[in-house]
Image (cartoon, rainbow, N blue to C red):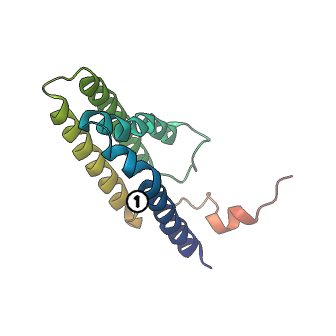
Amino acid sequence: MTPPAVFGLSVLMSFVAFGIVTRLYIWPRLRSISREDALIALTVPHTFRFVGLSFLVPGVVSPLLPSAFAAPAAYGDLVAAILAIIAIGALSAHAVWAIAIVWLFNVWGTADLLARSASASVPSRWGRRSSSQPSLSRRSSLRMG
């Protein structure tokens, strides 16, 4: 199986697994609690989107990952995490603007995800490899000494 096929299958299986978990455990619970509490439960996992900052840490990602992708992805995720934290605080405090900030968080997070997905799928934006950088296939065949 080719690497893109393996990746696609992995994404598909993740959707199926999370769909099952959602149908059996998450959705019934969300239906039994208030709207604010349900939104908090759905927003909390997004507070971990600060992990996207790892795109900026040398050695964590491939040096072939262009900064034109890494920086917007990292900071877009950070903004989404901050908006999620603000939304949770507003929902917990029953602020009149709580639903508005939840919408802002969702629109921002979705737009960021779609923009990064689009930029990652356009090879021309990844720039060109210099002749001193081995190709990914050659790198994978190099042995550790």
Q: Quadrant of residue 85?
A: top left
Q: Nearer the viewer, residue 64 or 111?
A: 111
Q: Nearer the viewer, residue 9 or 125?
A: 9
Above or below residue 38? Residue 9 is: below
Residue that sits furthest to the right in the current view: 145
The residue shown at (54%, 67%) is: 7
Residue that sits furthest to the top in the current view: 93
Percent x, y for residue 80? Answer: 33, 37
Whether residue 53 is visible, yes or no, is yes
Q: Nearer the viewer, residue 27 or 41?
A: 27
Q: Quadrant of residue 36?
A: top left
Above or below residue 18? Residue 59 is: above
Q: Going by the image, does 140 lie left or right of 129?
A: right
The residue shown at (24%, 38%) is: 35
- Residue at disc 1, secondary structure: helix
Percent x, y for residue 75? Answer: 37, 37
> Dot 1, how many residues are within 10 Å of its Cα: few (below 14), some (14-19), or many (20+)?
some
Whether residue 68 is visible, yes or no, is no
The residue shown at (29%, 38%) is: 39
Residue that sits furthest to the bottom in the current view: 1
Residue that sits furthest to the left in the current view: 96
Q: Quickly name the residue at label 1.
A: 120
Q: How many numbered discs, if any?
A: 1
Percent x, y for residue 102? Answer: 23, 37
Q: Nearer the viewer, residue 58 or 128?
A: 58
Q: Going by the image, does 139 lie left or right of 124?
A: right
Task: Report the amino acid beneath label 1.
Answer: Ala
Name the image quarter holding the N terminus: bottom right
Percent x, y for residue 52? Answer: 46, 40
The residue shown at (62%, 41%) is: 59
Q: Quadrant of residue 103?
A: top left
Above or below residue 85? Residue 43 is: below
